[in-house]
Amino acid sequence: MTDVRSPLSLLTPALTLALTVLTVGPASAGSLDQGQVRDAIEAAAQRNLPDTVVQVEARDLKVYGDLDVSGEVELRVLGTGEWLGRQRLEVEVTVAGATVGTVPASVEIVGFVEIPVLRRSAGKGTRLRLDHISSLTRPLDAVPSGAVPTVGDLVGRTVKRDLRLGSVVRESDLAARVDARRGRPVTVRLSSGAMRIQTTGVLQEDGGVGAWVGVVTAAGAELRGLLIAPDVVELALGPATGGSR
């Protein structure tokens, strides 16, 4: 089963309400410092995005309104969006433990992720090793659709076209994953409610976990089932077992 993920699929669903508190230290009397607001927004976004986002930048910040502040300033940032792209937020300002007001803000939040790239060219048929692969930090919206997201997802895969140094590898650049080879002994299972039937068999084709594969049981029955582990095939009930031959 081919897993093709868009860049946004690297993220978990956003929180419906999120906030962070940033104590930014003493400030001289005057207007609210936009650098402090930017730092607070970046901290809030980083906290509320998944660990796959390794860095965030708050760009094109617009703060609507102003407050006179002095002393120890604490900023509380509240948002209800996805914490990526253009966001409208509320910044609550506390000075010396007393809330002095809230100002709305608009900002473009850019998230960065680490994405594997080739550190050397790889010709068609190359089985990728760890020394073929490096990582770069890129803006999330610059990651191509279908890019393989982690180094671990690339090691051991075979490329099906020539790829250049520095390439971001897409799932479509790779041959289908093979977790079990033809001729491998497997456990063949059939489950329905409390009923469990199990026997042994032999794979009739290469396959990856999540793919439909042919199997011959110890009794000689030719069946198709889902490879749920490299050595386990799960059969489906009914005349149609699914998958393509």
Image (spheres, rainbow, N blue to C red):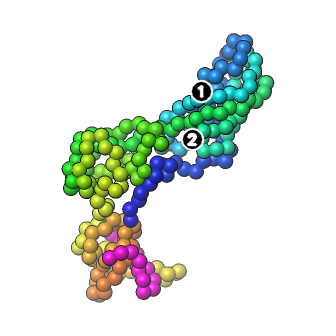
Magenta segment: does it hold 98? no
Magenta segment: does it hold 239? yes
- Residue 193 percent coordinates (x, y): 53, 80
**Position of 245 relative to 181 (above/below):** below
Seen from the viewer's position, the closer of residues 107 and 119 is 107
- Give the secondary structure at mark 1: helix
- Give the secondary structure at mark 2: loop
Predominant SS of the magenta segment: loop
- Tell me the residue that label 2 is attached to: 84
Q: Earlier in the sequence, mark 1 or mark 2?
A: 1
- Can see residue 196? no
Amino acid carrying label 2: it is Leu
- Residue 20 percent coordinates (x, y): 65, 35
Left or right for 197, reference 154: right
- Tell me the residue that label 1 is attached to: 39
- Quadrant location, the C terminus: bottom left
- Can see residue 141? yes
- Residue 202 percent coordinates (x, y): 27, 77
